[in-house]
Amino acid sequence: MITSDKDNLSIKIAKDIYSYLQSNNIAIDCYTITYEILALQLLDRVKEDERVENLFKSDIHQEVSDPKSECFNPIKAIIFLKDKHYDEACWLSFLLIYTDDSDESDWAFMRKLYGAEGLGLKTALTWEVVNDAPHLLSDRLDELVTALAESHPKPKFGHHRAYESLKHLPMVFTSYIGFIHEQGGHEAAFGLKDKSVDRTDYFKTRYDLIRQNVYRFGRLSTFEFLCLLGKMRLADVEPNSCYIAEASGPKRGARLLFGMLSNEQLDEHAIGLANYLEVSYQQLEAALCHWQKSPNRFIKHR
């Protein structure tokens, strides 16, 4: 497994990428610096996962879950809530993927959304709030959309949700809430208890369910949502592939690396390379996506 604290590790990973391509008879014009840029992107993904993993060992205060607090941090809040309020931790995970917000903006979108902008609530837009009065939900969501759209600055969706619009929010939220209720709650939807079920099989069944039931949650949002639930220890899931075949950015990265192959071949080689490098499928998927935007110059993600 790659660890991010070794000198010149990016050079070694670049050579390993080259070796994988060579051993699989994938045409290579020449060995260039671009493989090292991909290696740097991969190391960046590994470091990001290490930072999250280290949060589980740290003391986290309740204030991180308050959108009005300077300490607000959805990632820390999910970790804080996961053993205290499972529903809320899953709901926050959903909101985080929906907005694709980050600490780069000091969680500007999440602060307004989870803070129930314009609704005059005494609490945040918690799972309990969106479920306590079903007859009020539609009106509340419409008011929320109006308030968010009129706020200054208007919240922006992150890069992975670049084509999303606030006008879709009511349908996205009601479809997710309805889906969770149909499943019997978050615990029933994601909290796998049967340890005999394979984690990758469970990922695939959850993936298909979300794609079928949650409005405007496509390949990337669904993939990232389930990976986040796994990373936050809210679901015992692991991707069964990189899901390159249904991707856009990652597929461009895979074609840049492996050539103009079929979707199935691209997915097969992405799995093969991830296994060869001993990294997760999500780490390689994210690295390919960011690498293809600038294959000859490293640009740190966020």
Image: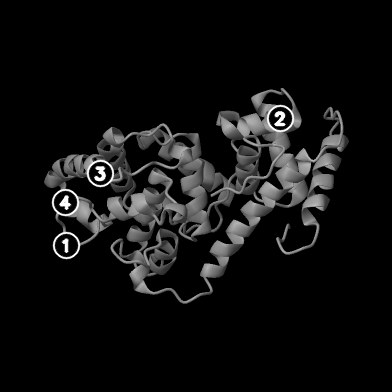
Label 2 Cα neighbours within 10 Å, binned few <14 / some 14-19 / many ≥20: some
- Which callout, 2 or 4, points at the residue further toward the start of the chain? 4
- Which callout, 3 or 2, points at the residue further toward the start of the chain? 3
Q: Position of residue 145 (x, y in %)?
A: 23, 40
Picture quadrant of residue 107 = bottom left
- Which callout, 3 or 1, points at the residue further toward the start of the chain? 1
> Spatial distance from mark 2 to mark 4, Cα to Cα?
47 Å
- Locate the N terminus and report the quarter of the image it occupies: bottom right
Labels 4, 3: front one? 3
Mark 4 sits on what residue?
119
The residue sitting at the bottom extreme is 59
> Spatial distance from mark 3 to mark 1, Cα to Cα?
17 Å
Mark 3 sits on what residue?
148
Picture quadrant of residue 27 = top right
Q: Are marks 2 and 4 in contact (CB under 8 Å)?
A: no
The residue sitting at the left extreme is 135
Mark 2 sits on what residue?
256
Res 110 seen here: yes
